[in-house]
Image: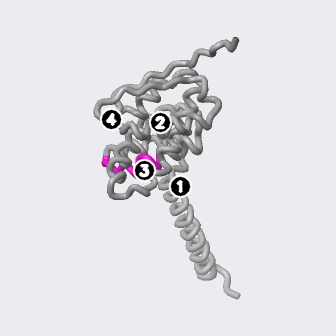
Amino acid sequence: MQHGPIARIPLQMRQVRRLSGALIVLLGFASACAHLGLGGAPALLDEAKAAGRAKDMATAYARLKQIEIRHPGSPESREAFPLAAASLRVLYFQHRLNEPNSVWVTSEPDFLFDWFATYFRDGSPEAAANALFVGFDYGIFRRFEAFAKSRPDLATWHLRARDDNGIIEAVTVERATLRATP
């Protein structure tokens, strides 16, 4: 068995290799976390805004959706909702004719309806209603009306949409008045 500086070289090289391997794994994990938006709601919001500026609406929408899934009710979720609605509107119109079975036409509007329903608990849904519906076709509004019928928490509200040639221009929201039964 050798002693001295020469004997230490193989041990040091093994340690360097292990540390290098561990560093590569950590960097890969950190990169994956950043890519998946695991940096929290602020990071997801920043990523979504950057994707929107780059006109990558699918990525922008995906990041915004993750905010609501992972951080519901957060300030970032409130900021993300109108951005998600705008992103979905673009994706919906891009796909509704050529790919009517696309998630942008079939299921993602329903996700936004569910997200929108959270605004009724706060008692301030009109701004969110306009963010969601203005610019969409009236069919989306009708889909929401059907969705709302299945939700008792939405039964105390009335939404009215004003449209121009089937495209929604404004939405008003008011509490329903309870009628006394004789």
Sequence-wise, which precedes: disc 1 or disc 3?
1
Q: Position of residue 162 (x, y in %)?
A: 36, 26
Crowd around label 4: few <14 · some 14–19 · many ≥20 (10 Å): some
Disc 3 element: loop
Please name the colour scheme applied to the rendered image: one colour
- Under mark 3, the amino acid is Val
Q: In front: mark 3 or mark 2?
A: 3
Pointer 3 or 2: first along the chain:
2
Separation of marks 4 and 3 at Cα, in angstroms: 16 Å
The kind of residue tagged 4 is Ile
Task: Give SS at disc 4.
Answer: strand
Residue position for label 1: 33
Q: In whole angstroms, how far apart are the C-alphas of marks 1 and 4? A: 40 Å
Residue 142 lies, with reference to residue 155, above or below; the image says: below
Residue drawn 57% across the image and 21% down it:
123
Mark 1–mark 4 CB contact (< 8 Å): no
Which quarter of the image is occupied by the C terminus? top right
Going from N to C along the chain, the mark reached first, 1 or 4, is 1
Query: Does the magenta portion include 13?
Result: no
- Between marks 1 and 2 in the image, the one whose residue lies nearer the viewer: 2
Q: Earlier in the sequence, mark 1 or mark 2?
A: 1
For disc 2, the marked residue is 81
Which mark is nearer the camera, 1 or 4? 4
Residue at the front extreme, as displayed: 182
Instruction: Give the extent of the magenta segment.
Output: 54-63
Local crowd size for mark 1, using a 10 Å CA cut-off: few (<14), some (14–19), many (≥20):
few
Residue, disc 3:
105
Counting other residues with Cα less than 10 Å from the Cα at mark 3, is it few (<14), some (14-19), or many (20 or more)?
Answer: many
- Kindly state the secondary structure of the residue where label 1 is placed: helix
Residue beneath disc 4: 167
